[in-house]
Amino acid sequence: MTNTTFTPRVFSGIKPSGGLQLGNYLGAIKRFVGMQGQMETVYCVVDMHAITVWQDPAELANATREVAAGYLAAGLDPTQSILFNQSQVSAHAELGWIFNCVARVGWMNRMTQFKDKAGENAEKHSLGLYAYPALMAADILLYHATHVPVGEDQKQHVELTRDIAKKFNHDYKVDFFPETTPVIDGPATRVMNLRDGTKKMSKSGESDMERINMTDDADKIAKKFKKAKSDAEPLPETVEGLADRPEARNLIDIYAALNDVTPADVVAEYAGAQWGKFKPALADLAVAKLAPISGEMARLMADPAEIDRILGDGSARAREIAEPILRKTYDIVGMLRS
Ligand code: TYM
């Protein structure tokens, strides 16, 4: 199968569970903004994915607005991109069910993120958490999306999406779903924990000092970078010198991503510098880049009705693309509608 018949279209999403952190910004949102204007872009707040683990109903709607505010504050323009929340477009759930019937249990068993999240206690987790990569495939393929910008941790799920598309096309003898390309580029596709450079930065980490939240103010951002773990050596002369230095690698990658340069550029500028020089420079850079975004998020969150309006409008536009694709899928599968 070739993708030549599919119009280039970007789809990606973020779960509204527990607030945005720097990894979401550098690994996803900032790159979403970079793709806007290059092709059609559809960005979702995936609230149905959030409830795969318990979410307080009193907080979910606000968490959904907060991700939307992060999108807008970082530069996504609702007239250029479609911005919406998943549960307002019921076709996601419907195609998700069809894909539950295409994906194999053996494929799901290979998903490393479920193993990491569920750990020893897999039986106690929701069936939704286990099945969610099939819903993620539906999110993407409902728009015939050809490009999916994500962080490194989502690569396996986008590959599963390709397997689901291929099996559907093969089983039903059609050339209907595209083979989606994961777009995983730049220096910050895996931002690490500020206290342990071998662990991914995430919203669920134990200590707040491990991560930069997108709602942190300038003082907090600066303090967290100044206290971030580094090591005893000065900065190396070349990027090769960062091998086996996970904390150093992470701080340099973050600097590079924030400043739109390469890690090699950062190393060239700071070769031989001590951490006492580099960390304050990183803190200043982070504050300069992130504080305007967190300020704008707070401003947007003060007017929830406006965010709801944008998401409602985006949902209507998303349905215009999704519904004909779902109808065609039902025809292919042989569902009777009268
Ligand atoms: P989620 O909500 O966990 O994360 C959203 C995006 O942020 C990226 N990310 C990171 N990137 C770099 N470093 C980090 N430390 C870091 N932490 C998070 C993730 O890779 C992701 O791109 N299943 C998805 C959401 C989803 C989706 C989709 C994505 C649902 N349907 C369809 C793309 C297309 C998730 O749980 O991401």
Image: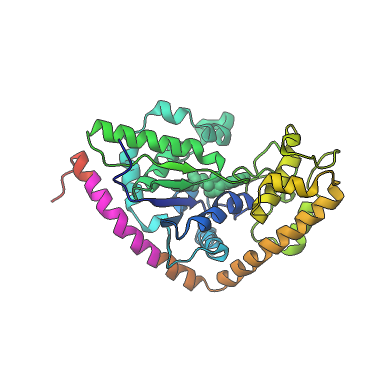
Q: At x 27% / y 50%, what residue is drawn?
A: 325
Dividing the picture into quadrants, the one containing residue 232 is: top right
Q: Is residue 206 visible?
A: no
Q: Quadrant of residue 66?
A: bottom right
Above or below residue 275? Residue 168 is above
Query: Where residue 118 appears, x then y in whole percent?
Result: 55, 34
Residue depicted at x 64% and y 41%: 200
Instruction: Please indicate, yes or no, whether residue 106 appears anywhere in the rendered image.
Output: yes
Q: Quadrant of the N terminus?
A: top left
The overriding secondary structure of the stretch rendered in magenta is helix
Residue found at x 52% / y 58%: 33
- The question of residue 316 being in magenta is answered with yes
Residue 299 location (% of width, % of height): 60, 72
Q: Provide the residue span drawn in magenta.
A: 313-329
Residue at horizontal 64%, vertical 51%?
257
Between residue 110 and residue 153, name the one nearer to us. Answer: 153
Query: Image check: 109 left or right of 338?
Result: right
Image coords of residue 242 (percent x, y): 74, 36
Of residues 170 and 305, the one nearer the viewer is 170
